[in-house]
Image (cartoon, rainbow, N blue to C red):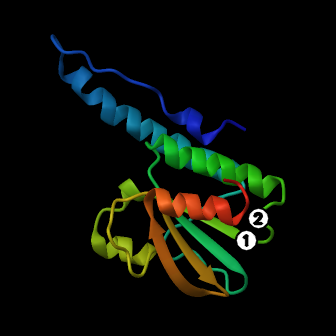
Amino acid sequence: MKKFEEIITPMAIRKGESNSHDAALPALQQKMEAEEFVSLLKVSRLHLWQPGDPIFASGRRILLGVMSASRYDLQLLDILNKAIQDGITGTDHFDVFNFPYVSSLEEALQYIPDISPPGLTPMVSRWENGVYIGTKYSSPARDELLKGYGLY
């Protein structure tokens, strides 16, 4: 399986002559990367989640809000995918959503009940036996998650 981190393609925009096609390239590239992100999730040990999908009633559930354009977030998914494969995470269940595609605070609240401050990824939310415990954000959340599984 291709690694999540490999979906990001470095790109440089040069100063000088350009046209509307050049200006559209970054957005087009991010759209293609987001589509590849979803495809990779489907073949990984992580699960794409959206409002309306079930929340497991038993055990630990981790919901990760990430940016498919963030190398750090994608590296985290690669580490977790391998850890799940190797049995390091036990029976914990990992759901993932691509935060930049959440269009409003109301929609964000359907993912994380007390989301704040929005936009700092990764967002690491925990549920125990179907009950929401809380969310942490950014690099401290990443570090705590990895340390919790002995991966840091």
Q: Residues within 10 Å of mark 2 (few under 14, many from 20)?
A: some
Please name whichever residue, 42 or 130, is drawn nearer the observer in this view of the structure: 130
Residue 23 to residue 103: above or below = above
Residue 95 at x, y percent in the picture: 60, 65
Q: Residue at x 47, y 28 (%)?
A: 9
Q: In this view, does 30 lie to the left or right of 60?
A: left
Residue 65 at x, y percent in the picture: 48, 61
Amino acid type of the residue that numbered disc 2 sits on in the rendered structure:
Thr
Quarter-of-image position of residue 53: bottom right
Q: Residues within 10 Å of mark 1 (few under 14, many from 20)?
A: some
Q: Is residue 24 visible?
A: yes
Q: Residue at x 32, y 66 (%)?
A: 118
Residue 142 at x, y percent in the picture: 54, 58
Which residue lies most toward the right here?
87
Amino acid type of the residue that numbered disc 1 sits on in the rendered structure:
Asp
| Quadrant placement of the N terminus | top right
- Mark 1 residue element: loop
Q: Which residue is drawn at 73% across and 71% down?
A: 92
Q: Which residue is drawn at 39% across and 38% down?
A: 30
Residue 119 at x, y percent in the picture: 34, 60
Q: Which mark is residue 89?
A: 2
Q: Which mark is residue 92?
A: 1
Residue 107 to residue 3: above or below = below
Number of numbered labels in the structure image: 2
Q: Is residue 51 visible?
A: no
* Contact between labelled residues 2 and 1, with CB atoms less than 8 Å apart: yes
Between marks 1 and 2, how big is the CA–CA gap? 6 Å
Q: In this view, does 12 lie to the left or right of 36?
A: left
